[in-house]
Image (tube, rainbow, N blue to C red):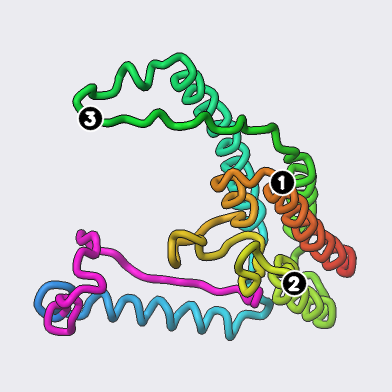
């Protein structure tokens, strides 16, 4: 839906081993998890204070710098993913063609040498890189604004722009094979349940070796980033 959201919580020493098991019960919680309800109280107090901060702020306390920083990091990850797959594929194919894999196999067991994988092409990440650069410039423009120095009307206009900005990351056609997920920056992974994938269209196309789809998703993601950046640029220009 493109609605900004937030998840807060606390974690103790446990790795959550009882999660979704028959031990995930109230009895376990009051005996071992949080007997004095200190974590529950702290979470409620923190959540309540955050809601009060949002509800009573003179202007909307949303910052776009974190989004810009995260997107650049995710972009670097998918570029590295592509490069690493190219190197690993080349090494694997060399081992297959040289017979090294078969020689290294246990002769007491049946071993079928895998077929060589197709080489990983050099994908064109330029549209995504240009879009991220523009996003960073737009973010900087918004960051220079001081809401305290704006008129009430301009401050309200800026609040409205920031509140709706996240929707610019939505793509009507959605992600491949699951069009109900429309956000280009993050979605539950196709094979990971609700485990998140960032830049999901691009990342999962690379993981599945769907090179044509990867190129398409790079373009679609870049287009959404440019629309978002343009939205921020217009919001900043409207306050001059």
Q: Give the range drawn in magenta.
A: 1-29
Give the residue number, with chain letter if any, for mark 2.
172
Give above or below for 210 relative to 5.
above
| Residue closest to the far left | 31
Q: Tag 1, which secondary structure?
A: helix
Q: Tag 3, which secondary structure?
A: loop
Give the residue number, with chain letter if any, for mark 1.
212
Give above or below for 122 relative to 21.
above
Of circles 2 and 3, which is in front? 3
What separation in Å lies between label 1 and label 2 (alpha carbons)?
20 Å
What separation in Å lies between label 2 and label 3 (alpha carbons)?
51 Å
Which numbered dot is residue 41?
none
Give the residue drawn at x 73%, y 46%: 215
Q: Which image quadrant: the C terminus?
A: bottom right
Q: Horizontal and vertical percent for residue 142? A: 76, 60
Q: Main secondary structure of the magenta part?
A: loop
Give the residue number, with chain letter if any, for mark 3.
109
């Amino acid at each position: 839906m493109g609605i900004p959201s937030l998840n807060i919580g606390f974690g103790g020493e446990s790795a959550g081993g009882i999660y979704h098991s028959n031990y995930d019960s109230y009895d376990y919680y009051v005996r071992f998890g949080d007997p004095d309800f200190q974590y529950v109280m702290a979470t409620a107090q923190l959540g309540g204070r955050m809601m009060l901060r949002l509800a009573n702020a003179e202007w909307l306390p949303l910052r776009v710098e974190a989004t810009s920083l995260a997107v650049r990091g995710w972009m670097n990850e998918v570029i590295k993913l592509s490069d690493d797959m190219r190197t690993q594929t080349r090494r694997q194919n060399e081992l297959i063609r040289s017979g090294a894999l078969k020689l290294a196999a246990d002769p007491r067991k049946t071993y079928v040498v895998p077929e060589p994988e197709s080489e990983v092409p050099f994908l064109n990440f330029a549209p995504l890189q240009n879009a991220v650069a523009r996003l960073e410039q737009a973010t900087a423009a918004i960051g220079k604004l001081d809401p305290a120095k704006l008129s009430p009307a301009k401050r309200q206009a800026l609040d409205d722009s920031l509140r709706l900005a996240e929707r610019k990351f939505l793509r009507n056609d959605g992600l491949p094979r699951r069009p109900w997920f429309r956000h280009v920056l993050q979605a539950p992974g196709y094979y990971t349940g609700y485990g998140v994938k960032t830049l999901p269209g691009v990342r999962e196309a690379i993981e599945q070796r769907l090179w044509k789809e990867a190129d398409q998703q790079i373009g679609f993601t870049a287009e959404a980033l440019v629309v978002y950046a343009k939205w921020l640029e217009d919001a900043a220009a409207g306050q001059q």
